[in-house]
Image: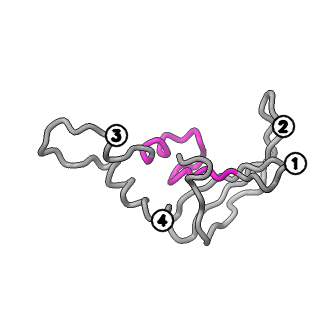
Amino acid sequence: MQLGDAAQPHAGLLATRSPTKLRPLGRRPVILQQYCCRVCDTNWLLEQDPLEPEHAEWICLYQAANILDPVSVVHQRTRSSVPAVNAGQSRTSGDAQADALSHRFA
């Protein structure tokens, strides 16, 4: 997942569900809205504080349906964070998928 300022969605997002009000313990309630990109099918989650709507936080879920889906963890890895067992080893499928998704943050 990508959080905060590093993740900025591009145009073409479509709201997939109605907004949900979440009341985390010890925090003010927040409004969660799920979006899906019509261009690349990336899932996004928008978290807004109703008292401070200008400070919205976008969370990129990639192909995951929610933040608990393990698919989103695969896309967090980069080539430099995955050690190669030997010099002739090819990249993993997770790295190839992450490279294919890199256009989403350009």
Mark 2 or 4: in front is: 4
Q: Are marks 2 and 1 in contact (CB under 8 Å)?
A: yes
In the picture, the disc for residue 81 is 3
Q: What whole-number distance in Å separates the C-alpha atoms at marks 2 and 1?
A: 9 Å
Mark 3 falls on what kind of element? helix
Marks 4 and 3: CB-CB under 8 Å? no
Q: Mark 1 to mark 4: distance in Å?
A: 31 Å
Q: Position of residue 33 (x, y in %)?
A: 72, 54
Q: Residues within 10 Å of mark 3 (few under 14, many from 20)?
A: few
- What amino acid type is highlighted by mark number 2? Arg
| Residue at the spot 77% in from the left edge and 57% down from the top edge | 18
Disc on the earlier residue, 1 or 4:
1
Identify residue for label 1. 51
Which badge, 2 or 4, comes first in the chain's sequence? Answer: 2
Q: Which residue appears at 81% of the width and 47% of the height?
A: 49
Left/right placement of residue 94 relative to residue 30 reads left
Viewer-closest of 78 and 94? 78
Residue 106: image tag = 4
Q: Quadrant of residue 36?
A: bottom right
Badge 1 amino acid:
Leu
Q: Are marks 1 and 4 in contact (CB under 8 Å)?
A: no
Front residue (pair 66, 53): 53
Q: CA distance from mark 3 to mark 1?
A: 38 Å
- Name the N-terminal-most of marks 2 and 1: 2
**Above or below for 11 versus 7:** below
Q: Which residue is mark 2?
A: 28
